[in-house]
Amino acid sequence: MADRLTISVDVRALLAALDQLGPAAERHVHRAARITAEQIRDEASGRVRRATGKTAGAITIEEAPPPLGGYRVFVGAVLGRAANLPQWIEFGTRRMEARPFLFSSARLEEGAHLRRISEAMTKAIAETGLGG
């Protein structure tokens, strides 16, 4: 008699849970990304030097179009000012020293964002029954 071991596994439940993971992860990650965008916007608004407050007021959050999804923090053109003013402030010019406000704010938020994304994925995994 030959030694033999046969294992049959029904993977239908696993495959169904994996099918649900994408949409669940998207929902949770989308919420986390919105929080990050709000934090960056608020920090950048506080960092930009205020002469009139127009540049700080032009820092907005936009929903990124598919396929990217998520959010982006955007500094729009300031009415009555040069359209490139936010860029000049951030990076400087030949005549003006850089006074970074947007990218430094994003760097400050990096660790918290990674933590939020990790928590979002953990929630999505638990929600679909894959976590245990």
Image: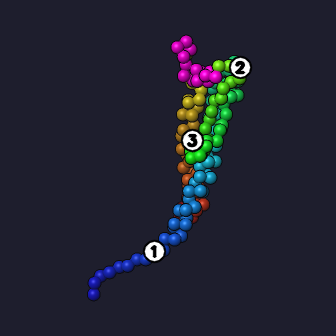
Q: Which mark is residue 28?
A: none
Around disc 2, counting alpha carbons within 10 Å, would you say few (fewer than 14), some (14 to 19), or many (20 or more)?
Answer: few
Q: Quadrant of the N terminus?
A: bottom left
Whether residue 25 is visible, yes or no, is: yes
Which residue matches tag 1?
Answer: 9
Q: CA distance from mark 2 to mark 1?
A: 68 Å
Q: Which mark is residue 80?
A: 2
Q: Are marks 3 and 2 in contact (CB under 8 Å)?
A: no
Residue at figure coordinates x 57%, y 61% from the top left: 20
Which residue matches tag 3?
Answer: 112
Q: CA distance from mark 3 to mark 1?
A: 40 Å
Image side of residue 4 versus residue 58, left or right? left
Q: Is residue 113 above or below residue 2?
A: above
Q: Nearer the viewer, mark 3 or mark 2?
A: 2
Query: Residue 83, percent across and down?
Result: 64, 22
Query: Residue 29, percent across and down?
Result: 59, 49
Q: Which residues are magenta?
A: 83-96
Q: Nearer the viewer, mark 3 or mark 1?
A: 1
